[in-house]
Image (cartoon, rainbow, N blue to C red):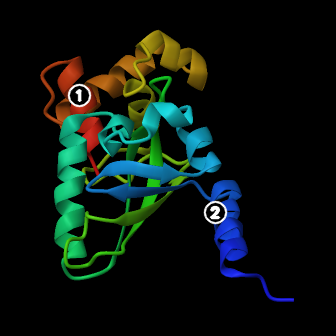
Amino acid sequence: MAANPAELDDLERLAFRVSPAPQVITANRLMLDFNEAFQRLFGYRREELLGELILRLYPSRADYQAIGERCLSWLRQSRSYSDERFMQQRDGEVFWARADGYTLTPEEPFRLMVWHFERMERPMRATVNLTAREREISAHIVNGLTCKEIGRKLGISHRTVEVHRARLMKKLAAKNSAELVSKIIVLH
């Protein structure tokens, strides 16, 4: 027996809501709807995000703007866009994520889009020559951990962390901690 259109609509809504893939529907970068997996990934309650700019999930406004410009440029030639980037949970934790977006309005790409996010368990791909340890330490730096805390987490001396942090500062030409965090966040 075939389902009627109203039943199909209900089934589609249910499938979206309980899908294990974190998904969000945006209109001009405002979050119109999202599923339960999306809420779990970012740690927000539904009412905290509905109607909000997706900027709320980025660690910095600069990252939001840079990714937006890159995405828009790409979507002018294609209906889909993918990248890996830092995102931020409600509790402040910054994590590496894969984002896949698809525009439903190619003439105005941001007008209506569907996005899928996936948490990546590996550190960023660096465009500067960072060692594996520097990439690992940089992921902890953006989450605000001190050298001693990073050392305890990684089972290494805090002095070793300080040496790696100093090398990161030099490689990324950062003058202070805030600039270092900002440069790590926008590093792709």
Disc 2 is placed on an element classified as helix
Disc 1 is placed on an element classified as helix
Badge 2 amino acid:
Arg
Q: Residue at x 67, y 73 (%)?
A: 6
> Extreme bottom residue here?
1
Q: Is residue 102 above or below residue 149?
A: below
Label for residue 13?
2
Picture quadrant of residue 75:
bottom left
Question: Who is closer to the viewer here, 131 or 61?
Answer: 61
Alpha-carbon span between mark 2 and mark 1: 43 Å
Q: In x, y percent, where is residue 33?
A: 48, 52
Q: Residue at x 72, y 81 (%)?
A: 4
Q: In x, y percent, where is residue 123?
A: 46, 45
Question: Can residue 157 be seen at all in this image of the molecule?
Answer: no
Q: Which residue is mark 1?
A: 180
> Extreme right residue here?
1
